[in-house]
Amino acid sequence: DAGVIQSPRHEVTEMGQEVTLRCKPISGHNSLFWYRQTMMRGLELLIYFNNNVPIDDSGMPEDRFSAKMPNASFSTLKIQPSEPRDSAVYFCASSFGDSGYTFGSGTRLTVV
Amino acid sequence: AQRVTQPEKLLSVFKGAPVELKCNYSYSGSPELFWYVQYSRQRLQLLLRHISRESIKGFTADLNKGETSFHLKKPFAQEEDSAMYYCAPQNSGYSTLTFGKGTMLLVSP
């Protein structure tokens, strides 16, 4: 298995533009998580899906952020419009049961 | 409220010295506990979980329910241990992990 796959690895965009981050979880994992990592706040859970259904999106900072999981093998995190303070590394992780998470390599987002 | 505390932002030791990275948690019930490691600019990786009672890369962690702690230890640090370490409790019945702020371990030659 190739693990959790995220794309793009790096994204540089101008303020106000739409940004879409993508994640392919490990096949067979039934939970998917989006985290944001910054120096100031560490790792913050943004949203969590179980069996493709959003369970907890209380970490999504604003309405500018949205996430979807149309099927078991794909999820997106969208920011529209993007702002400089959204600059961070965004990690996707997947899991099955209580086995612990497998993380993707992350997307480093820079909004200028 | 669920909370996990890693009191040290940075821990700097010399190669061969013992290491202890502290983690305290405040959780209802009996959480499952994990340590994750992130090497420079890489993905987070599972280091160990308390239920498995394993030793990974020479690291161990003992759950102390009385002190609600899950400190990570290694008797002799190596330069390749330099990384960011995150303690993460997981409440039983829920799938989400709550990550601490992390401790950066720097091992100097």
Image: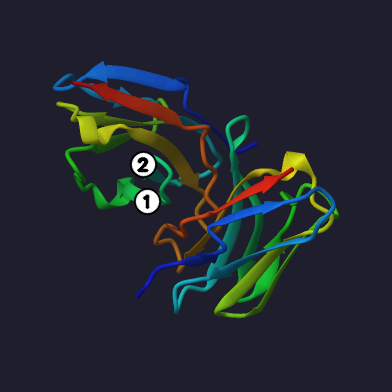
Q: Amino acid at mark 2?
A: Tyr
Q: Amino acid at mark 1?
A: Gln
Which of discs 2 and 1 lies nearer the camera? The answer is 2
* Structural distance between the alpha carbons of marks 2 and 1: 9 Å
Mark 1 falls on what kind of element?
strand
Mark 2 falls on what kind of element?
loop
Quarter of the figure with the C terminus of chain B: top left
The numbered disc on residue B45 is 1
Q: Is residue B94 left or right of residue A20?
A: left
Q: Is residue B73 above or below residue B29?
A: above
Task: Write the residue at 54% across / 38% down.
Answer: B27
CB contact under 8 Å: marks 2 and 1: yes
Task: Write the residue at 64% across / 75% down.
Answer: A52
Residue B78 placed where, x, y %?
18, 30
* Among numbered discs 2 and 1, the one appearing first in the sequence: 2
Q: Is residue A73 left or right of residue B41?
A: right
Q: Is residue B18 above or below residue A1?
A: above
Q: Is residue A34 left or right of residue A112?
A: left
Residue matched to label 2: B39
In this view of the protein, which residue sits in the foreground, B23 or B32? B23
Residue B3 placed where, x, y %?
57, 34
Q: Is residue A97 left or right of residue A89?
A: left
Which class describes the residues within 10 Å of circle 2: few (<14), some (14-19), or many (20+)? some
Q: Residue furthest bottom?
A: A71
Do the residues marked 2 and 1 share a common chain? yes
Chain where mark 1 sits: B
Q: Is residue A96 above or below residue B71?
A: below
In this view of the protein, which residue sits in the foreground, A7 or A94? A7
